[in-house]
Each structure stands twice: as C-alpha cells, then as structure tokens.
Image: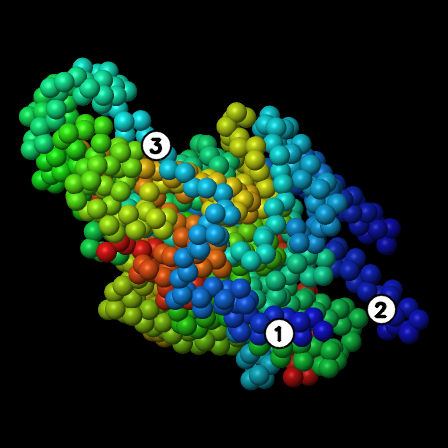
Amino acid sequence: MSESQDFVSRRTMLKTAGATLGAAAFARALAPVAEVVEELGAEEFLQKHYREMTPAELEVVLRRIEADALENYGAEVHVRDVRPREGVQFGYALNLSVCIGCRRCADACHRENNHDRRTNQSYIRVLEMQQGSFDMEHGDATYDHAVPQPGKYYMPVQCQQCDNPPCVDVCPVEATWKERDGIVVVDYDWCIGCRYCEAACPYHARRFNWEAPEIPAEEVNPDQAYLSNRIRPQGVMEKCTFCLHRTREGRLPACLEACPTGARVFGNLLDPSSEIRWVLANKRVFVLKEELGTRPRFFYFFDE
Amino acid sequence: MELAISIGAVVLAACGPDPDIIAWRAGLGASTERSPEAEAALFPTTIHEPPELTSITTSDGVPGTACATCHSIAGVTPESRATSADEVGGPHAGLRFAHGSNTCGACHASDDPTSLRLADGRALPMREAMTLCAQCHGPQYRDYQHGSHGGMRGHWDRSVGPRERNHCVDCHDPHAPRYPSFRPMPPPRDRVAPVVPRHEGAPRHE
Amino acid sequence: MQTKADSHWVSYPRFLARALWSATDGGVTFYAWMTGLTAIALVGAHAWATQVAQGMALTGMSDHVSWGLYIANFTFVVGLAAGGVMMVIPAYLYRDHDMHDVVIVGELLAIAALIMALLFVVVDLGRPDRFWHLIPLIGRFHWPISMLTWDVVVLNGYLLINLHICGYLVYMRYLGRTPDPRWYVPFVMISIAWAISVHTVTAFLYGGLGGRPFWNTALLAPRFLASAFVTGPAFLVLLLQIVRRVTTFRVPESPIRTLIAVMRVTVLVNLFMVFAEVFTAFYTGGAHATAARYLYFGMHGATGLVPWIWSAVALNLFGAVVLLVPALTRRTALLDVALVGIFVGVWIEKGMGLIIPGFIPSTLHEIVEYVPSLIEWRVTAGIWALGLMVLTIALKVALPWMQTAPAHSHDG
C-alpha cells in the first residue's frame, strides 16, 4: 500500500513538473502576444461599437486616436465624427469615354486616405480594358506604359456603395453597415479581421491591413474622420467611404478633384438638379455585375 | 424574443431598402434644371482661366507673351487662310497644329488678333473661347455644363461652398486638341504575390 | 455505489481528477508521442503569436486571395467532425451492436476536430483580441443574417452535444451505472441532424457568395457532405486499427467493414460530384470555367494549383479503385495506404483545391497566386498536433472505462 502510494506521489510530482514545464514553454512561445496585449490597454480592448457610444464616450475615443497618431506616427492630426446629412443620398458616376487611365484618382485616394506607402495601396483600381469588350478577363490593372493606349479604354473600380451590399450581410459582428446617406462604412475598432466581407465583395473594393500602415509623419493627412480616413489599425478591414470626411461637409471626393478630364460625377441623388441626376437621366448608364443584385450607387457610362 | 427580432430583421431585409433609396430610384426619369433664382442663391462656380488664353510662348521660348506685343505693330496681320504654323512663321513657327482641317481663320479674327471669330463672323474675346469651342463640340459643351466633362474642384454642394471648373484649354491645346498621352501614376503593388501580366511587355510588380 | 448525499457534487470532481490522472499516465511510447506533439504545438503557438504581433503580412495571403491555408484546413476539419456521424448512424439508427461498442471513438474524433476547426478560425482572425465581439449579448452577433454566425452556433453546438454525450457515457461508466438512455439518446439523435447541418452551414458560408462563381453552386453543400463522409470513415478506420494495436480496447472487425462499406459509396458519390462540377464548368465556359481552368490547367502561365489538384485526383481515384475491388480491400497494408491517400486527396480537394480557386481569378479577374508561407504551415501543423493531443487524451480517458462496460449494455 505505502509502496504504491510512494509510486503514485512520485508520478504526481513528475507529472506536475512536466505540466509546469509545458505551461512555461507555452507561455514563452506566446510571448509576442503578451507584448501586443500590453500595448493594447483595457480602454481600447473594451471600446464599444461606434453606434453604441454616447457622444462623450466617442469624444474620449477620438482624442485617444489623435494621441495614438502622435505617438506612433509623429503626426498632429484632428479626428472628427462626421454624421450623414438629412436629405442627402450620395451617388457617383464615371464617364468611361473620358477616362484616360492616368491613375491620378488612385493616387489621390492613396494620399487623402492615409494608405500604406510601401504597398502603394488605394481604394481605386484602374483596369485597362480592350476596346469592344467588356470582359474583365482581358483587363489589366498593373499596366505601366503611356496612357491612353490606342485600342484601350480605362475603367476605375472602387467601392460601389451597393444598396444591397453583400459585405454588410456577411459581417458576423456588424462591424460594417450602410449609413443613411448610402455610404458603407467600417468601424475599424470593432472589426475582428475575419475577411468574410472581402470574400463577399464582387468588386474587389475591400482591403485588409495585413500590417500596420507605414506613412511618414509629413505625409499624414491630418484632416481625419473616425469612419473614414484615420490611420487604420493592423488586422482590420477598410474600404472607400466616398471620402465622407469631405463629402458630408459638401466637398467633392479626393478622387474626383484629382481627375483631370472630368470623368467623375458626384452628387446628391435626391437633388433633381444635381449633376449626378442629369447623368442618370440623360446618359445610358450601367452598373457592374448587375446580375448579382447588389444595386450599386456607382454608375458607368460612355458618351455616344 | 431575440429570435422574433432577428426574424423581423430578415423580413425587413427582404422587403427592400429604406424610403430614401426608393425615392431617388423612382425620381430618375424626371430631370429638373435649377431656376435662375435658385442658382443665384448658391456659391458661384468659377471657370479656371489658363494664361494660354491671352498669351503664347513664342518659338524662341518666351512664355506669357501677349498677342498685342507683336500684333499691335502695323502690318503684322494674321494670314487667315494658313493651314499650318509654318505658313504663319515668326514667333508661331513650330506650333503643333492638329485640329481637323481647320484653317487659322476658322477661329481667329483676321482683323483683330486678340479676338476670336465665331462662325457667323462675330468677334469673340479670347477669354470666352469656350463659346467658340461649343459651336462644333456641342455634346461636349452640354456635358460640361452638366458636370460630366471637364475636371472640377471644390464643393458638390454649392449651398456650402464654391466650385472651380477647368476651362477647355486646360486639357485641350486648341491647336492640337487631342489629349496628350503620358506616363500614368505608378501601378498598385500587391502585397505578396505578383499579378500575372496579361500581355508581354507588361512588367511584373512586387 | 453512492448515497444521495455525496451525489454528483462529490463524485464528479473525483471523476475529473481520475480522468486527469489517466490522461497523463502512460508508457514510454505515450510520453514520447505527447512530447513530440507538444513540441509541434509549441512551434505553432509561437508562429501564431508572431503573426498576431507583426501582422498577417507574414502569411502568403493578399487582398486578392484573402483566405488561405487556415480556412482550407478549417473546411476540411469541419468535414472530419461531421464524418464521425458515420459511426453514430449505424450504431443508433441501425442498431449495429458492434458499432455501438466503438461509436464513442467517432464522437471523440468529432470533439477533437471541432476544437481544431475553432482554432483554425481564431488563427485566421486579424484581431483575435476582439473575439468577444462575436459573443451574443456582450458583442454584436449578426445572427441570423451572417452565415458565419450560423457557423459559430452550429460548431459550438455540435461541440457541446458531443461533449455531453461522451462525458455522460464515460461518467456513468466511472460510476458503474448503466447510462440512462433518456439522458443521451435524444442528444445522439440531435447530433446526427446537427452533423449534417454543421457541414451544410460551412458550405453555405461559401456557396452564398454571389460574387464568387466558383463557390456559388447549389452542389457545394452536398459535395461537402460527400467528402466529409469519405474522410471521416477513412480516418476512423485507421484510428480503430491503431487503437486495436496500442490499447487493450476490443475493436471488433465489423465496424471497420461497415465504415469501408460506407466509403465505397461516398468515395464514388464524391468523385461523381466533382466530375459533375468539372463538366458544368468546362462545357459551359464563362465565369465558372475560369477558376476551374486555372485550377486544373493553369492560366496565363500561372499554374500554382495544378500539381495540387491532379495529386488529389490521382489519390482519390487510387483510393476508389482499392475500395471497390474486394480482393484489394482485404489486404490491410494496401487498404491503409489507400485510406491515407484518400484522406490527403480530399484534404487537397477541399482545401487548396476549393478555397483558393474561389479567389483566383479575383473578382476583377486578375490572377494573383497564393503560396502558403512558412508561418502558415507552422501554425497549421501546431493545430493538427493539438488536435491529435486532444484526441489521444480523450481516447485515453474514455476507452478504459468504456471497456469495463458489459457487452451490449446500451440501451439502443
């Protein structure tokens, strides 16, 4: 009896030692996570969903984001919360006959929205298409020769701000939704980074922050909003917001201002005298992948 | 309870979008021009005025030379039937000329070098060149007026702020109006794998 | 054996302690096996931690191919979990008594596979620290609109059901009591339907995406189930042979034969469905065919998945032939090779061969290839090692007690 008890306790000791060793090894293996957790802070960890925050709570968050930008990027920025305006439904149209494929829109987006400099990230991808074909199979987004090329036309693609957005439906945590003025936004502080929306989007409109964006302090655009162009954290989704920090205050989006040819038309769909409404009424507009039923608010057209 | 709410959400989603969306989609057919009074209440739209409108860069490379600098001298009168810059000679030599089969006199007033000449023979100040362009390029002018041709900056909502628009000649050299071809901004660099180029000659990117 | 007073409050902790003891007790082989798995799991844990800290740029994924090896493995192990039901159905619906004796092996496999599936989702998250956003009531659970929330429900539900069934049966054995069928038979019946739903929901996760023509097919869910009922039995037949060899647990021959009989059908159904998809894609052409063409033949000089998919085809065909010829099936060594081949074949077909081509060409028809990075392989190996550890421990705890049961005591 005592012998077997001895045996048992010796085994117990050995097992305890083994378990301790194992636990220590796992703790050591997971050390990089501990550093991240330390940096995160309880306040950020427990932050509520954008739509659940009171104005006071949101205010605290905005100031924290500004402090983070100063600490991590050395940039003085101002982060606002810009809400949709009553009586405004945004729409966008693009004249494919006029677009010359210069990518200035993509570049303006890159700078306006504080995208990662190394990857030359942008919400806009310009496809060089074969004249006489609408088959994207023959498109090319990485062309690097003088434009416009004979026999080609150019089709910039960005978020279509669908009225029936598949990306919003699939999000498991409601981190992305359609705002009252039609803009689909992401709460970068609520997104868990599962990338289901990226798989669901038929327009390659969503981007993931594979790592924290890298931007030199002097290139950071300080005019920022919570739901749009503030510097995004690592590991979350982002997307085109029609520059809501500009457009909700009546200004034109950055990509439109950068367009030298005026291929881009932006405005309020509820205003019958707006340019966008004139285009919709007078041009033969179409939307991309209409058969999918996403009902985009981004229209394309050719001049006759 | 939560189940009921969720089912309600599904039903709602199936019923369709909110009234605003229905409103704009239904209103598409009717297009309304803004009344002059309504227009007056808004911030203005100004048209950018490129210096090329009233001056040229001479063939010996002096920019901003006003037309009158030479054309006020007696005897320096434009040759209205000339069809190329070489025929005109002098400071205009080397001017690229590729605007259909137009002659100089199609647009320039032969008696007044600082003016343009409309098709009905009336003179038009250089600054109002757009009206001249519009004589032939009606559809483009119409598109321009409705904001779907020609770049702009400023506000979409002119009850909030003004807007500045490009002039035709900001993009189109009146003597060779085809938009020149040039290097685009650099292509996207996709994070990991290279995009497979579609045709030979297209470079691979990291 | 016990009075009402010291009922479960006393005996259940004792049971758990006893289980912990037997789970950590074993011979040299056992310790070597567990140490090896621990080492691999450690490598995986460290790789994941590095990925969390430095960002998912360390993976081979991109905005074009935004799901990779992790989700491929997730899809596969969900199938493995569902496949365990192929032991439950004969045991409970067809009253196969021999199968009934070993059915717990299938249920324990489901538990291990589900834990792996959940881990594969967690390692794929860009922000695992925000995991709580997914928890109903404290987070914002987008149910029932998002299929991913359905997956969270069915996977965790299936895990709980199986934990309950296995836990209850083993605990009763520990107490020396006859399990009360009222406490587990209803759950077994639910688990059968649930197993189907687990893999159906996972298929709907992809099939519901209109923008991805390669996945957007009604055949996806049936295909998922067919392949699940191939891999589940294949793994179980191999597992039962190992159990027979390394433990004293009595594994009768007939369950193995039943599982092989099941596979004879499912392996063909699976191949048939793959063929049906390939036919539809290539005969019709168009958007469906582009991804298939890239997968099977490569496109514009990009051939990253071609070796993978043809290996899968070859392995599946080889396995199907061995299973269909009784003379070959009787040769255990050959059968085992075939089973491993099928297992690997389906792993490719449902992983690299199904998840990746969903993204290639991209929705703008660009071709950006995907190659898993070393970090991804390490994390994947780590999760498999952890899964095998869970399975080993579960079997080690459960089997000795299940053995002590009098034959055919269950009340099916």
Q: If the image is split into quadrants, where does the C terminus of chain B sit?
A: top left
Query: Residue A38, labelled with which disc?
Result: none
Q: Is residue B205 left or right of residue C300?
A: right
Q: Amino acid at mark 2?
A: His
* SS at circle 2: helix
| C356 displayed left or right of B116 | right
Kind of residue at badge 1: Ile
Q: Residue at x 46, y 32 (%)?
A: A117
Q: Which residue is mark 2?
A: C8
Asked whether A181 or C147 is in front, the reply is A181
Q: Element under label 1?
A: helix
Q: Is residue A50 left or right of residue C82?
A: right
In depth, the one of C17 and B205 nearer the eye is B205
Q: Which residue is mark 1?
A: B7
Q: Indicate the secondary structure of the residue bearing disc 3.
A: loop
The amino acid beneath tag 3 is Glu
Q: Is residue C324 something one can see in this rendering? A: yes
Chain of the residue under the numbered disc 3 shown in the image? B
